[in-house]
Amino acid sequence: MSANGRNSPNDQSGLWTQEQAAAAAGDLEGKDAVEVCRWMLETFGSEISFAFSGAEDVLVIDLMAKTGLPFRAFTLDTQRLHNETYDLLKRVEDKYDFRLEFQRPDAAKVDEMVRTAGYDCFYDSMENRKLCCGIRKVQPLRAHIATLGAWVTGLRRDQAVTRAEVPKVEIDVQNGGIVKLNPIADWSFEQVWEHIRANDVPYNELHDKGFPSIGCVPCTREIAEGEDIRAGRWWWENPQLRECGLHPGSKAELPADR
């Protein structure tokens, strides 16, 4: 049983319902983010892990650390990340005195993709881009969270049109009905950076070079003043479809036979 008396989501006979998730999301809406993090860590304990990547994610680690409770975090190492990103991962581990769990793509699948479609095949078509994201990100994510009862993200509603209605608690239907938590869903871009600066939170040096959203090297660029904060991600595609497939509601779904 979880701390709130419900069956753990990791117990397949006791998966949370949409109604339970919606009720929890309503209860947590507008509450202090540290309080939200405390609730999720107390509720799911060691069965929960946080998907770490960008500025918002270091912020969530900082918020979880402020609860004084133990926590887990993992990162998807696509093996095409910026050097600045790898540097950040080490600085975060050192500051918060814990070890990230690294999830990497299947080498044989990467080799097959490169052999048949090309090293930078994602520029050629959306199908190829979905294929690359699927092999390098979605499959490692799904393999890892299949071992969990819930997972945490740094998603925010103001990041993109595809995320405008993100709740703080939801059911991840793409990943077997696991509970997905977004503790800073209601934070603004300005709030994120106010907290980072006020609390000396480590962040990726690329943010100082015009990169508000950072992914793999070939799929990320700096943005111009006035552009949407995710305009530098897969900039050659329709912004309404600009997701990698990690999050429910995304249009970038992984082909079933890949």
Image (tube, helix red, strand yellow):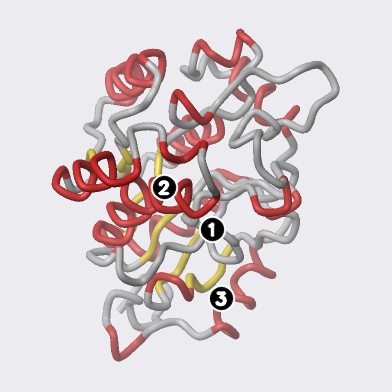
Task: Evaluate if marks 1 and 2 touch, with contact meaning CB atoms under 8 Å apart.
Answer: yes
According to the picture, the residue beneath numbered tag 3 turns out to be: 21
In this view of the protein, which residue sits in the foreground, 76 or 5? 76
Q: In the orientation shown, which residue stands out farthest toward the front?
A: 116
> Which residue lies at the image location 49% right of the left edge and 36% below the top edge?
57
Mark 2 or mark 3, earlier in chain: 3
Q: Is residue 206 left or right of residue 104?
A: right
- Kind of residue indicated by mark 1: Ala
Q: Quadrant of residue 99?
A: top left
Is residue 104 at least partly visible in the picture?
no
The mark closer to the camera, 3 or 1, is 1
Is residue 219 at least partly visible in the picture?
yes
- Kind of residue indicated by mark 3: Ala
Mark 3 or mark 1, earlier in chain: 3
The picture places residue 249, in percent across and down from the top left corner, at 61, 65
The picture places residue 114, in percent across and down from the top left corner, at 27, 39
According to the picture, the residue beneath numbered tag 1 turns out to be: 252
> Which residue lies at the image location 59% right of the left edge and 29% below the top edge?
213
Marks 3 and 1, how far apart in space? 24 Å
Q: Is residue 244 left or right of residue 233?
A: left
The picture places residue 253, in percent across and down from the top left corner, at 49, 63
- Kind of residue indicated by mark 2: Cys
**Vertical side of 202 occupied by 231: above or below:** below
> Which residue lies at the image location 33% right of the left edge and 20% below the top edge?
86
According to the picture, the residue beneath numbered tag 2 turns out to be: 133
- Quarter of the figure with the C terminus: bottom left
Q: In the orientation shown, which residue stands out farthest toward the bottom?
A: 13
> Which residue lies at the image location 50% right of the left edge and 18% below the top edge?
203
In this view of the protein, which residue sits in the foreground, 135 or 120? 120
Mark 1 crowd level (few <14, some 14–19, many ≥20, 10 Å Cα): many
